[in-house]
Amino acid sequence: MLLQEPFDLKLTLASGQFFRYEDLGNEFLLLTQGKAIRLSQQGNVLSHDGCDEMYVRRLFRLDGEYGAALTRLGKDPVLAPIIVRYPGLRLMQQDLHETIIGFMCSVQSNIPKIKMNLRLLSEFCGSRIGDHAFLPRHGIPLDPVLVRQARTGYRAKSLVAANVLLTHDFLEQLQTADYAQSHALLCSLPGIGPKVADCVCLFALAHDDAFPVDVHIARAMRTLFPKSHLTDEKRVRAFARNRWGKDAGLAQQFLFQWARDNLRG
DNA sequence: ATCCAGGAATTTT
DNA sequence: AAAATTCATGGA
């Protein structure tokens, strides 16, 4: 398929919002929603196998208003020089249940370990198609021993408890609710607090005003806005919402990338 | 060996 | 209400 607006597949996949993929060198293998998808990009040509073009467009939000959001954010003198460093970095719209499980694993962890947890969770508790393993389905009981064997540590208890609460009905409520309602519903689940809830709102529900504040984002914001007294994460969130509004989520994605590249430590 | 990592839940001031 | 502590596990 031919890309009309900027899109960097490699950068977007590696930006910490999606974990179920592997870099095979010449292409990427994505394991999501029972599909093994192979993607590769050369310039403005994006090749897909294992799903149709509509699926790719939805997953990477290629029909959204990316360009317009970039234009608005580019008017921010602090953000502008950061945005231009990462052309084609986009927000995804992933499977809701998989995103919830993924970011429950992300608590006090790191990306390689999260990917390992989800790989093991898929092998031990999920479904299998050929030599590919997929995450367990929502709403079903998970074996606590197997979840623990996926090296999920103290998160195992919450994962087991949450998955039975994630019924089709509950997920449907999440999909139809607005940002505030979705955030509250997510926070009612065990093992999910404001940060993980914001990640789910942003990466699965396309609530673009969500602004997940982790240690990296907090550091970045205090570095970029030293006079703004961003003492706690509540103030960071309020500042971002006030400054970027509906574009806060996309701003966060650039800030997270910038922090990883420049503020290590 | 010691410390920290895309925090959340619980306990203590 | 805010601050401190605890919770597995892997990697630096």
Image: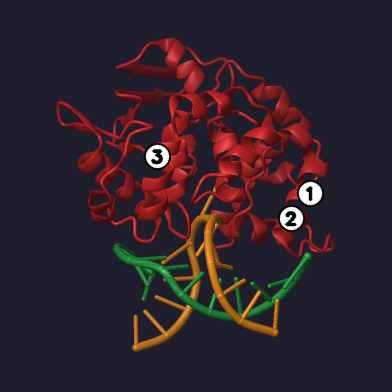
Chain colours: A red, B orange, C green
The numbered dot on residue A217 is none
**Occupied quadrant, residue A91:** top right
Residue A123: image location, x then y, percent: 21, 41
- State which quarter of the image contains the C terminus of chain A: bottom right
Q: Which residue reaches farthest left?
A: A130
Q: How many marks?
A: 3
Rounded to the nearest angstrom, the CA distance separating label 2 from label 3 is 28 Å
**Circles 2, 3 touching at the beta carbon (< 8 Å):** no
Q: Nearer the viewer, mark 1 or mark 3?
A: 3
Label 2 SS: helix
- State which quarter of the image contains the N terminus of chain A: top left
The residue positioned 60% from the left and 38% from the top of the image is A185
The residue positioned 49% from the left and 35% from the top of the image is A12
Q: Is residue A193 above or below residue A1?
A: below
Residue at numbered disc 2: A234
Label 1 or label 3, whichever comes before in sequence order: 3
The three-letter amino acid code for the residue at tag 3 is Asn
Decide: few, some or many residues near mark 2? Use Cα within 10 Å; few <14, some 14-19, many ≥20.
Answer: few
Tell whether A3 sits left or right of C2: left
Label 3 SS: helix
Badges 1 and 3, same chain: yes
Label 2 or label 3, whichever comes before in sequence order: 3
Chain label for disc 1: A
